[in-house]
Image (spheres, rainbow, N blue to C red):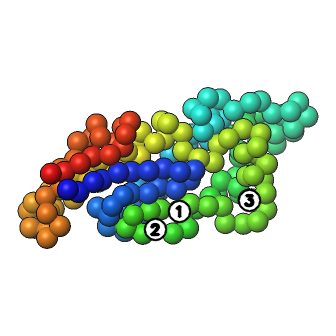
């Protein structure tokens, strides 16, 4: 029996057991990273709710300099630019903030309002993307006669329990 599961923890995506290539995991990781950055750019936290407003003085300063008083973590844009994929394997993608200064800013903002982990809507989109990638693996295995044996995937298994089983 082959068990396929996708697990997100914080800002990591993990697939159990190996069913994707490194390139596919890199694509899924890039997709997840872009979803996270896009969500944050709209001022939405990791709980899919709006992040709290800025303090009055900082709100005025940001409105003057950037043109937006929304907590979107884009005063200079460096911190979100420093959020990158660090490592990719056939079963996981690890993302982190690359510079020390940006890590300090991220940690402070995370304490004010959680944002650095995947939200439920991010997870749903990542599971849909992984399911799309997984279907491609099935077609390749059926047409190329891969030695791993048949794998069955139903997109509904990527929601809720996030586990699909093959006989």
The number of discs equals 3
Going from the N terminus, do you reach mark 1 or mark 3 first? 1
Determine the CA span between mark 1 and mark 3.
Answer: 15 Å
Q: SS class of the residue under badge 1?
A: strand
Asked if residue 81 lies left or right of residue 16, the reply is right
Q: Which mark is residue 94?
A: 1
Determine the CA span between mark 2 and mark 3.
Answer: 21 Å
Asked if residue 89 lies left or right of residue 40, the reply is left
- x 29%, y 40%: residue: 157
Asked if residue 94 lies left or right of residue 83, the reply is left
- To which residue does mark 3 refer? 103
Q: Which mark is residue 88?
A: 2
Going from the N terminus, do you reach mark 2 or mark 1 first? 2
148 or 65: nearer the viewer: 148
- x 30%, y 53%: residue: 4
Q: Position of residue 117 (x, y in %)?
A: 59, 47
Q: Position of residue 156 (x, y in %)?
A: 28, 37
Q: Position of residue 13 (x, y in %)?
A: 47, 55
83 or 94: nearer the viewer: 94
Q: SS class of the residue under badge 2?
A: strand
Residue 27 location, quadrant: bottom left
Going from the N terminus, do you reach mark 2 or mark 3 first? 2
Asked if disc 2 and disc 1 are in contact, CB closer than 8 Å, the reply is yes
């Amino acid at each position: 029996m082959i068990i396929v599961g996708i697990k997100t923890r914080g800002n990591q995506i993990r697939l159990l057991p190996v069913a994707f290539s490194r390139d596919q995991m890199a694509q899924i990781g890039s997709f997840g990273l872009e979803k996270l950055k896009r969500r944050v750019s709209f001022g939405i936290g990791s709980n899919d709710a709006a992040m709290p407003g800025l303090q009055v003085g900082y709100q005025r300063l940001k409105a003057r300099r950037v043109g937006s008083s929304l907590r979107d973590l884009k005063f200079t844009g460096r911190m979100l630019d420093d959020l990158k994929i660090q490592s990719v394997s056939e079963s996981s993608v690890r993302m982190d903030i690359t510079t020390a200064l940006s890590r300090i800013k991220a940690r402070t903002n995370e304490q004010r309002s959680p944002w650095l982990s995947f939200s439920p809507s991010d997870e749903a989109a990542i599971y849909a993307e992984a399911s799309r990638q997984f279907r491609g693996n099935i077609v390749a295995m059926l047409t190329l006669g891969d030695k791993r044996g048949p794998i069955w995937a139903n997109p509904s298994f990527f929601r809720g329990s996030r586990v699909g089983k093959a006989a």
